[in-house]
Image (tube, rainbow, N blue to C red):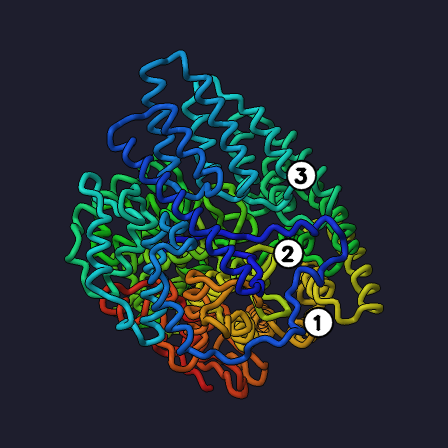
Amino acid sequence: MHGRLKVRTSAEEAARKKKEQDLKAKAYRNGMDKIFTLRNAENFDNNLLELSGKILSVNPDITTLWNIRRECIIKMTTDNPDSASTLFDRDLNFTELCLQVQPKSYGAWHHRSWILENSPKPDWNREVSLCTLYLKKDERNFHCWDYRRYVARKANLSAESEFKFCDEKIQKNFSNYSSWFYRSQLLPVLHPHPSDSSRPISEEKLKEELEIVITAAFTDPNDSSAWFYQRWLLGYSDPKLDLACFKLTQSQAVIAFTKLVDLSKDKITISTNTSLDKGIWRSLSGNKSDSIWIQKGEFEISDDILIKMNHNDKTFELEARKIDNNSIIGIKLPSFGYEFGAAVKEELKNQLDSCNQLLEFEPDSKWTLLTAALLMRSIDRFQYHEKTLEYVRKLQKVDSLRAGYYMDLASKWILEEKLKNMVESGKFDKIDLSSLDLSVVYYNQFLFIGNEINLQNNSKLNKKSCKFALVDGCKVTF
Amino acid sequence: MDFIDEDFIDHNKNNKNNHKKMEVDQNEELPTKFDMEMTIKYVANHGNDKNDFEYTMTEFLRMSGIYWGTTCLDIMGHLDKLDKKSIIEFIKNCQCKKSGGIAACDSHDPHILYSLSAVQILCIYDALDEIDIPALGKYVQSLQQIDGSFFGDKWGEVDTRFSFCAVAILALTNQMNLIDVDKAVEFVMSCVNPDGGFGSKPYAESHAGLIYCCVGFLSITHNLHRLETEKLAWWLCERQLKSGGLNGRPEKLPDVCYSWWVLSSLTIMGKAHWIDGAKLKEFIISCLDTETGGFSDRPGNMPDIFHTLFGIGALSLLGYENLKKINPTFCMPEEIVSKIYQAQILEY
């Protein structure tokens, strides 16, 4: 049903085709009737294999026919165990035939793995070779890639040898997202980061990879495959789970996390060594998961509090201090991205230079603009703050399909800068976020700390994103 | 949700600098208006000729075909064009007495894909009690594995599509307690990839259709907070091409069905505004067959009922006039789903 061009034909031609199709439909009907009759009579033999094979070789998506073949093979090998290897081999060859007709047939691929899983002597290495061959014909067939990962594990192939295969594929053609994708799975196995589990690969390897990918990306700057890989190397800024912010007043306690959490399910425990430990946290929104959780009650504002969160045997801490007689607050900003070492930063600076050079010739090159902005953020996100915003605003125009994304991205970066300044100044009472062209408010989990938040003059702001405004004692003006 | 992947094989891809080929030629005169009347007829008449070649050769997915047809007719406000009685009779005949599962058509074997299609149709007709619901629940339960994953049928194929089907069936029939939901969630989460997407099983390449299944699964089980939405939604918004159409993986051709898989996932995550809705609308309508009605995968190709539903479904998500609102998680009319089950949707 996909990719079939509608062609105009003469009435004669159409009539001829109709006749031909009617015959085919009739033959199919007869074939299926015969097959079901034989199956109901439990005649699981060569004849049934042959009949189902005729139809499957034309249409390998008919799951029930594969099931019937399996029933035949089970029955025939039970009756005559000596026939097993012949039968299994024959069906392996048969699936190959079907995959030539339809290389994306779920049924044919699954039947192949069923044969091997049930075969007394499966040759997994042969399967790997077969994938190598098929991936030559179509280097993006994800059924084949996925099957390859499965058979490579079965054949006990090392990550090194798979990496070699994957690398050859990339060297042959940079524009192959599937190979870059596999690379991003293999590298963390081969070159894990020695100390930081949130970083996929070691700094040393990262530097090498950056060099490789930028060459690939510049070879064809309009092809997205390598740019996606580059972005993975630089790291996405989705934060890892941690405590974010805490505020205790006489009538309520508010605790916030860097991510949405479901405190009833996510095996997170909070301890403060205060009466709060006996109370119940409720999500701000009323939803099962939220980043802001509230406890109502009567609380004494006395000493500083150390909040501890336990999750998966890891402990996270947040120190909250008494700032006046009415509140105790604590705030811990996330890192907003990876912090790279000097050698990697040097390479990032070189790449930034290259991007900027390319932009002189092609000022509207989308991937170059985006990558340059991400590189600047990876080098020093606050030093380059204005420049990164300039690039993202430009992207809103040159890549207008995704203008909404870039608006949100700029809003996020603006908030990060504001939060950093707020924490550095130590002043949390009044937060001024007016006239910033914000489309969405990220980092709700830090903003409820203020008593007055000014969001005026952000005409495109999605107010639904300002959930923190629901926290009692938080006065927001739009 | 039967889900046919037809990710296009572009044999020219080895030839460098052929990006123009990755796009659709929009210089030809293409439809710019969606004439609903003709498409209503196209869907309503589908299958009138039981001996038709196409119809015969697709009997192995008949149940899904009927789901596609009923859903898009209902979204267009013309469910009355189909014969409810005979459809329900057909479904009843397809439920397997032994296993409780439902087959695509008579004599074929039960499968979780067609079990979901059947349940979706029955919900639309408010006729769930016409089949043996507890037996169907047991069937779904029997397919869950120790690691939380689901087989598609007793023959052991594992796929995140089947995880989606399982929880969708159980949510719509109010039997979620039959399975280990936590384990099911762990399995789906074990399929997250470094690019933020999901494939059909652990380590499998990210693909927009499978992303829909996993995001839909998390929406049904209220676990969307487990997603890294920024990363995933960016990958998804990059599926939009200059023509306005969406593809299923990087550097592939656009296809109307991805309008649904991508836009519904973005909608569930509150990020539908990350793509250009007006351009997508234009692309979908350019795939309308103005002679017969119905939508094809790309402009100028043969229409079919699968692309017709997913084109209309995406148009409904985009707020197209005179279409009923569609539920992004279940791909069914919102007015039907809202009476049965509340799935999780992120606002932004």
Q: Position of residue B93 (x, y in %)?
A: 21, 49
Rendered view: A223 above or below B106: below
**Residue nearer the viewer, A53 or A341:** A53
Q: Residue at x 55, y 52 (%)?
A: B7
Write down the residue under mark 2: B251
Q: Toward which corner of the image does residue A389 lie, by quadrant?
A: bottom right
> In front of the other: label 3 or label 2?
3
Q: Residue at x 36, y 47 (%)?
A: B60
| Chain letter of the residue carrying label 1 | A
Task: Give the SS element for disc 1.
Answer: helix
Task: Give the SS element for disc 2.
Answer: loop
Q: Amino acid at mark 2?
A: Glu
- Binning the other alpha carbons within 10 Å of mark 1 as few (below 14), some (14 to 19) or many (20 upward) gives many
Q: Is residue A288 left or right of residue B97?
A: right
Q: How many labels were placed on the picture?
A: 3
Q: Are marks 1 and 2 on the same chain?
A: no
Q: Are marks 1 and 3 on the same chain?
A: yes
**Residue nearer the viewer, A30 or A144:** A30
Q: Toward which corner of the image does residue A409 lie, by quadrant?
A: bottom right
- Binning the other alpha carbons within 10 Å of mark 3 as few (below 14), some (14 to 19) or many (20 upward) gives few
Task: Determine if residue A424 is in view.
Answer: no
Q: CA distance from mark 3 to mark 2?
A: 17 Å
Write down the residue under mark 3: A136
Write down the residue under mark 1: A391
- Binning the other alpha carbons within 10 Å of mark 2 as few (below 14), some (14 to 19) or many (20 upward) gives many
Q: Earlier in the sequence, mark 1 or mark 3?
A: 3
The furthest residue to the front: A12
Task: Give the SS element for disc 3.
Answer: helix
Q: Residue at x 50, y 64 (%)?
A: B296
Q: CA distance from mark 1 to mark 3?
A: 39 Å
